[in-house]
Amino acid sequence: MGHRESPDARIKAAVEDGRIGPVAPLGSLALMPNAPFAADGEAALRTAIDVQTNEALEKQTRLGLADLVEQLGTAPRNADLAEALNAGLPAQLIEAGLTHPDGFPGVEAWLRSSAMADADQAPLALTAEQFAAAPLMAEHARSEGISLSIWPGHMPDAASAGCALDVSGFVSPEGFETGLLRETVEALASACNGRPLVILAQGVAAATLALGADDETSFGQIGAALISGLTALIEGGEMPQDAPDLLGTEVQTCSPIEGATLAAMPLRLSEESQLMPASDGLSGSISLTVLTEDGAAIPSAAAMTALQRREAGGPDALREALEAGCDIDRLEAVNSKALRARGFSDEGISRVRNALREGLPLGAAFSRWVLGDDVIATELKLQPEAFDTDGRPLLRMLGFSAEEIETAEQAVGGAAEATARRFFAQQGITLPSASGFALAAARGLSQASGHGFCVDASDWTPDAREAALSAGIAIHLGALPREEEGKASDRMTAVFELAEELQAEEARAMQAGAAPGTATGAQRTRLPDRRKGYIQKSTVGGHKVYLHTGEFDDGALGEIFIDMHKEGAAFRSMMNNFAIAVSLGLQYGVPLDEYVDAFVFTRFEPAGEVTGNDRITKATSILDYIFRELAISYLGRDDLAELGDDVSHDGLGRGLKDGTREAPQPLPDEAVQFISRGFSRGQLPDNIVILERKRAERDEAASASAEEAEDEETEDYLSDPCPHCSSFTLMATGDERVAHCATCNEPTRSESGFN
């Protein structure tokens, strides 16, 4: 790039070389607030939390509406539309579905896309004093998904023009190319036609490495000199006395570039930035490797320059180390030994090893186009067409668990960077910490006070954050990761895996010929063929759910069925299989308490108001409702019920308080064989009478009657005909010579007696 080139040509060449990105509004490039500081920091935090909560609720509402629209299908009947209206679907959406070119599926797709669209919320701006006055509120805001930007001084205008510049791209083995950088910035300022331009300095730590820094001290010295030198080159002024020697330049004093100012802030990684520097802003986290378009890991430009300054053969040695660094035998589970045990030949393992050494990810290394049809079809007896581009399903079919595959992927993904760091350590180069470099480089900010210098301090300690603010560096605090979203699915996956393990253990015991009851693992208790239980119909957030239970002979819960017939096929299948997994766990002896503790108060859609249940009025999810209902019914966990103990199982009356009912009695053991313990919630219902006492009274009365009858005179039937009416109805009396006819009522006397 020479002086004869036009500014546009210089800019184009710099963009192609990856030194700069396109000019765009500063707020779209950097992680910075779009609004100025609020007058009341704590009030601003509360408002931001409320806004974030409302946005989350709006997202959930749209997803719930999308579920209702999905149930309508492509051609709903009038009855279906009426039911959807009653379930809470707005009439406007029904009208939209009737007029949309794609029908109701088009409305559903729009609802889901609008709900899942990233809001890309800008950080909330706070002064250092406001942040210090409300630290707990600030952490609460971060936990709610709000990022913060704390500025000790002046904050640049987010609407001004900005351009990201990779400082490390202007470092050669000879030193800092000040002339090339100044020409580039001058061309950018000229292209802005007088508009103010903010130069976002990126890759400062990587440039410091390329300039010869090899420990914490030298990183701090060269970093400070680089910051002050950049300020002098762009905004004009005199460099510090030691800066030219440290930077490898002869420039000491520069005139300002009209319209250009210097800043250093974390990039907002988007399509507009188009710049992936080896280090972000003032951060000391340096990437020694980069990925090519085909996924191979190669040394970064800064790493190459640093090695070229130290040793002629350093770059070649690093390349060789990277090629041999990711070996399959270094993986914990997916290694050559495990692959041979599953049918891999030495040729197949060699192909995988070479692919990993070339920098391919794990899934690509086990794909069809790496292994070949001969290995997949002949050796592994699988269909090659199923693994064209991704070999992870192949590993699952070979018996590797999802956790083992994920661990191997992480090891492969970080192998190149770990290898490069070990190589640099062997060369005597110690990379700085993120906070350590930023604070050390702060010494060079003396000439740039009041400008936009900010660093991502999300992972820093509170002391390091305070030190940065004291040094005049603004800090960015990203939103804390929300773990709630994955809790339910993770727990469901754990239950599935537990059920699979129990089934596999039982199968192994049966295969080994073990007699029932002699296996060392858990034993399954079978439910009776004809079993008790109950059905609870409810709606959760407008979604109907039917809960069916099955009980052992002693009234303990043994199985559940969850029916949500109006949901999508995938969701119904997941809930059905989840119910099967829970039932298997209960039959293998997993206490119901464990499921209750794991699933109550989980948060995901559908959620909201509960109707049809006398003890639960609100639920944070389907699983929260189901396991609270089971805990109340089978465990007596009234603490999980929103209504008080004065409501009976049938929901009638106000209990003891109105004096209409007596205190509920516990369900007797003798009644469990006839009454569902879950339906009665462990208590004897008011409208049920145990008849054991009546039977005892009846038997006692019958016994007494029999005893009385024995004392009374008894009449015996006689076979002789009555002499008066000739009927064979003579009955003997106490007198052996006198008989009584039951037909004519005439007594009959015999002189010789009756036989």
Image (cartoon, rainbow, N blue to C red):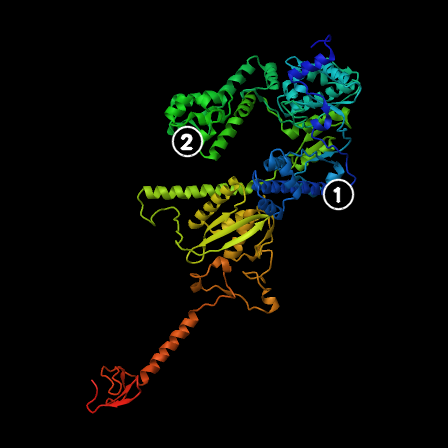
The amino acid pointed to by label 2 is Leu
Residue that appears at 46% across and 42% down: 496
Residue that appears at 50% across and 49% down: 594
Please name the residue that numbered disc 1 is placed on.
43
Outermost residue on the left side: it is 752
Which mark is drawn over residue 416? none
Residue 143 visible from this viewpoint: no
Residue 752 visible from this viewpoint: yes
Judge left or right: residue 589 versus residue 152: left
Q: In this view, does 548 lie above or below 376?
A: below
Q: Which of 693 and 138 is in front in this view?
A: 693
Outermost residue on the top side: it is 4
Q: Which comes before the other along the chain, label 2 or label 1?
A: 1
Q: In which quarter of the image is the N terminus?
A: top right
Percent x, y for residue 293? 56, 20
The amino acid pointed to by label 1 is Ala
Residue that appears at 47% across and 59% down: 677
Q: In which quarter of the image is the C terminus?
A: bottom left
Please name the residue that numbered disc 2 is placed on.
398
The image quarter containing residue 312 is: top right
Judge left or right: residue 425 versus residue 96: left
How many dots with numbers? 2
Q: Which of 537 and 149 is in front in this view?
A: 537
Percent x, y for residue 257? 78, 17
Q: Nearer the viewer, residue 135 or 500?
A: 500
